Amino acid sequence: MYVAGVRALVEPSFWLGQPRTSPASFYDYFDALLGWEPFRAAQHGIAHHCTLALNPKEANDPRCLPVLDELPRYLVKDGVVAVGEIGYDAMTPAEDTALSAQLQLAADHGLPALVHTPHRDKAAGLARTLDVVHESALPTDRVLLDHLNETTVRAATDSGCWLGFSIYPDTKMDPDRMVRVLREYASERDRILVNSAADWGRSDPLKTRHVGEAMLAAGFTDDDVDQVLWRNPVAFYGLSGRLDLDVEDTTPQATHEGNSILRGAPVTTATRATEEGR
Amino acid sequence: MLIADLRTAVRDHLDDDATAWLDRALTEAATTPRWEADFAAAARHCRRSHHPELADATRILLLHTARPDMPTLTRLYAHGTAAERRAVLLALAHLEDVGPDALPLVEDALRTNDTRLVAAAVGPYAARHLDAHGWRQAVLKCLFTGVPLDVVADWPARARGDAELARILTDYARERTASGRDFPADLTRVLAHTTPEEP
Ligand SMILES: [Zn+2]
């Protein structure tokens, strides 16, 4: 991923393919997203953040519901840049409750929300999602509607939310269709995000790069690509105030020289050359 | 290093907003449990100063000021991100009231493969409280995972005359050599200290 140009990623908590049956499984998962995963990514030069939530599918299992009460202690963490994925899977009353509760949690913690739109009965699912968003304390400009496609992009655009497209090998959205959407919705280009996955299904984390290549092949400029693949996600997740694009050096430092604060060595100013937002 | 020096070094690096945040957080840490929210939020307040150690350092200052009891310290570690756990481990050397009860936290960190956690675990607190077996395993883990020997507090004193450590290191070096691999130069340095005479 680094070689392909990836310098930062946001890993949303989601369904793993095998249903979880206890809250503790979620806590270990969240701890991994705040512990091992950032370390693993940093080893390869990639800044890692996450979004945390009880996902729509598992919100239907009463055994998992205690996660909602424990989320607040996770949502204060530095690495958490949104509440998500939340939203609808089968549009059940349990999903209604979890969605509105977690939109409120997002508002309470100063976080934006990453909202999964359902794969089945998609247009109706989006409408119901927007009803709940509008009833919530979270303004639409702090909501990212994800997994959009040609049938839902218009309604999503009219809502004022950020527009997310998930690029997959066989499902959801592909790079060439994405280019057509970007052309048709050119005036919305400052709030369109594309994402890729390495999840339980057929997925390819480099699909984001493929979108960039398809954009260039279709005549979009480098700046257009930079906007969609970098500036827009930085702007949306930056709403959290917690996005940190410096990549931690994972090599334990033994040196007693240089600018070490913890070892009491001579103090100099920060060495890290950082272009904010790049 | 001394807490006073740490405080000075931190202030030299923080911008005005972060300094104001830290002042308020330290004041609260002395009196209310609200400081735990600041402990969690340290990195985003220090972010603009772009120094990788500032979040660790400010968290250590908060812990030193708040002096959490053992159940609180254990919870902060257990519920902590990797960065928060690292700060708890680094703070142990500065928390005079904490006796050997925090050893399970050190042992937990030594079981991870996050080298920053391993490095934070082998400070002065581990040198004082780890038993002989635990300390030898910690040294071996450092050599194994590439954590530099100089991160291990008081290693020359603890290694001196340790024949069992010498055996473990010799076996490890033999295993590496047999597989056609190098062994770390740090191994030779520790091994030299394990002989009964002064090296
Ligand atoms: Zn989803």
Image: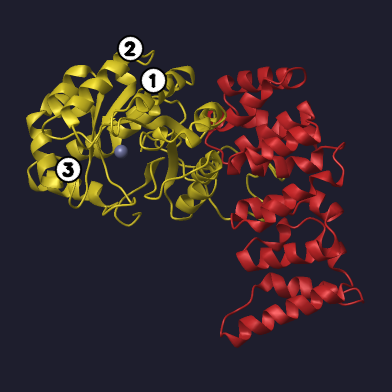
Element at label 2: helix
Q: Is residue A264 visible?
A: no
Name above or below for residue A109 compared with residue A149.
above
Q: x, y percentage for residue B79?
A: 63, 37
For the residues bearing labels 1 and 2, Cβ distance under 8 angstroms: yes
A227 with respect to A198 (left or right)? left
Q: CA distance from mark 3 to mark 1?
A: 27 Å
x 29%, y 13%: residue: A134
Identify the residue position indicated by label 1 in the image.
A100
Q: x, y percentage for residue B158?
A: 86, 63
B127 with respect to A25 (left or right)? right
Labelled disc at residue A173: 3
Identify the residue position indicated by label 2 in the image.
A135
Q: Nearer the viewer, mark 3 or mark 1?
A: 1
Name above or below for residue B10 compared with residue B31.
below
Name above or below for residue A152 compared with residue B56.
above
Label 2 is found on which chain of the structure?
A
